[in-house]
């Protein structure tokens, strides 16, 4: 099952270019990809703070220290100007760069491909990007570093637990595969620091079945996003200062996160929605640099990360949600806030 699943993914999504290895989850996929590509004498993994904690945790498991970089205003992905300055400052101390394709947007990989060619390894956390397409085809196709996708239930292509590591460089995948199979080379002799990252046959079967209905799932998810956008327009929320992510490419909407107006903090609004039985989430608040586990990590200035994480609200989003629920959520948001209440 797993062999068939991998082969279908490689052919149907990457047109046979490069190589893939499924993994039992994306966190393990990130660990393996970082371990197999990091510069051995490097110390830092440069990454955004505005990501899921799995990104810095996977670097820590590889013996590295996360070094957080601020994000940019529109796409909420790592600010490459700040990244470039930090790379100059840290030089050989950089072990790997780990950008995050925020909520599945197709970040521009041209710069990161250049970094990889300059000898600075890049592992892209593309947890929510499986199925996303940009002008080059499937997001990540041909990329010379590694790209890690998650198949967790909360992602657009959800099979329960699972993930995928892709690279345009077959050697990286061959090493990831070996590391994920106890470091075995040929015979049963372990020759590198391995672990067991294999996707079960059972999950691969669910993966194959999910591939068959993926187009429908994408359509449903994008429809829900459209409903939200239409309602936001209808209630003039953009004029009132509400913002959405500026995405690139044809995405598989993972969830729908919006920013409250500059002068309204998200937690006040979240409480208000909660009183109306509307349950929200806030990906990612607190951002990583505000979490205890990473509180001693180095960081750049965090102006944009702070601003966005204070304002972010992830609205109710599941494939069976209907238009009436979407309307109700936005109508509630459009009510004037009662400050001091
Ligand atoms: C979901 C997610 C992960 C972890 O994926 P798992 O498959 O659950 O291990 C890592 N990074 C980001 C940004 C995610 O959203």
Image (cartoon, grey):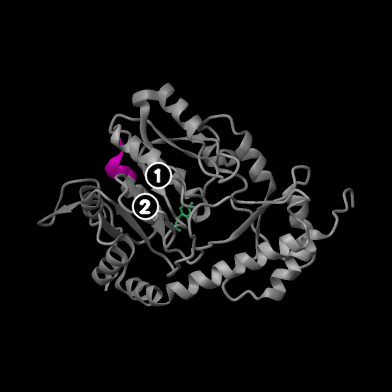
Nearer-the-camera pick, 296 or 158: 158
Question: Picture coordinates of residue 44 (x, y %)?
Answer: 40, 32
Residue lying at the far top of the rendered structure: 89
The answer to whether the beta carbon of the residue marked 1 is less than 8 Å from any atom of ligand 1 is no
- Furthest residue to the left? 187
Magenta segment's dominant SS is: helix
Q: What stretch is highlighted in magenta?
A: 34-38
Of the numbered discs 1 and 2, the one sitting upstream in the chain is 1
Residue 173 percent across, percent down from the top left: 25, 52
Residue at the (77%, 54%) spot, across then down:
269
Q: Which class describes the residues within 10 Å of circle 1: few (<14), some (14-19), or many (20+)?
A: some
- Quarter of the figure with the N terminus: bottom left
- Please give left or right for residue 21 compared with residue 161 in the image: left
SS for callout 2: loop
Task: Tell me the distance, in whole angstroms, between the alpha carbons under discs 1 and 2.
Answer: 8 Å
Helix, strand or loop for disc 1: loop
Q: Which residue carries the number 1 mark?
A: 109
Q: Is residue 323 left or right of residue 203?
A: right
Residue to which mark 2 is pinned: 140
Q: Name the residue rendered at 34%, 36% in the picture.
A: 114
Q: In which quarter of the image is residue 207?
A: bottom left
Residue at image coords 61%, 64%: 225
């Amino acid at each position: 099952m797993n062999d068939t699943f991998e082969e279908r993914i490689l052919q149907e999504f990457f047109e046979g270019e490069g190589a893939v290895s499924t993994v039992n989850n994306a966190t393990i996929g990130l660990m393996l990809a970082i371990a197999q590509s990091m510069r051995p004498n490097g110390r830092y993994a440069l990454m955004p703070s505005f990501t899921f904690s799995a990104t810095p945790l996977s670097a820590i498991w590889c013996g590295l220290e996360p070094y957080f970089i601020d994000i940019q205003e529109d796409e909420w992905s790592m600010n490459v100007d700040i990244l470039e300055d930090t790379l100059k400052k840290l030089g050989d101390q950089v072990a790997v760069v780990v950008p995050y394709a925020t909520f599945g947007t197709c970040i521009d990989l041209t710069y990161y491909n250049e970094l990889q060619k300059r000898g600075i390894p890049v592992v892209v956390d593309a947890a929510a990007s499986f199925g996303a397409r940009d002008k080059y085809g499937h997001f990540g196709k041909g990329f010379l570093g590694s790209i890690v996708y998650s198949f967790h239930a909360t992602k657009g292509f959800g099979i329960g637990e699972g993930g995928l590591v892709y690279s345009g460089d077959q050697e990286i995948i061959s090493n990831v595969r070996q590391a994920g199979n106890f470091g075995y080379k040929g015979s049963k002799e372990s020759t590198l620091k391995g672990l067991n990252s294999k996707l079960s046959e059972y999950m691969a079967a669910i993966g194959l079945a999910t591939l068959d209905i993926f187009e429908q799932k994408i359509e449903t998810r994008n429809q829900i996003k459209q409903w939200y956008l239409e309602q936001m327009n209808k209630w003039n929320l953009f004029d009132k200062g509400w913002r959405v992510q500026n995405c690139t490419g044809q995405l598989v909407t993972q969830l729908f996160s919006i920013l409250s107006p500059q002068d309204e903090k998200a937690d006040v609004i979240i409480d208000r929605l909660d009183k109306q039985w509307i349950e929200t989430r806030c990906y990612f608040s607190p951002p990583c640099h505000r979490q205890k586990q990473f509180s001693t990590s180095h960081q750049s200035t965090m102006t944009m990360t702070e601003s966005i994480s204070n304002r972010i609200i992830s609205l109710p989003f599941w494939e069976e949600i209907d238009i009436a629920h979407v309307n109700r959520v936005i109508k509630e948001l459009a009510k004037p806030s009662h400050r001091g209440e």
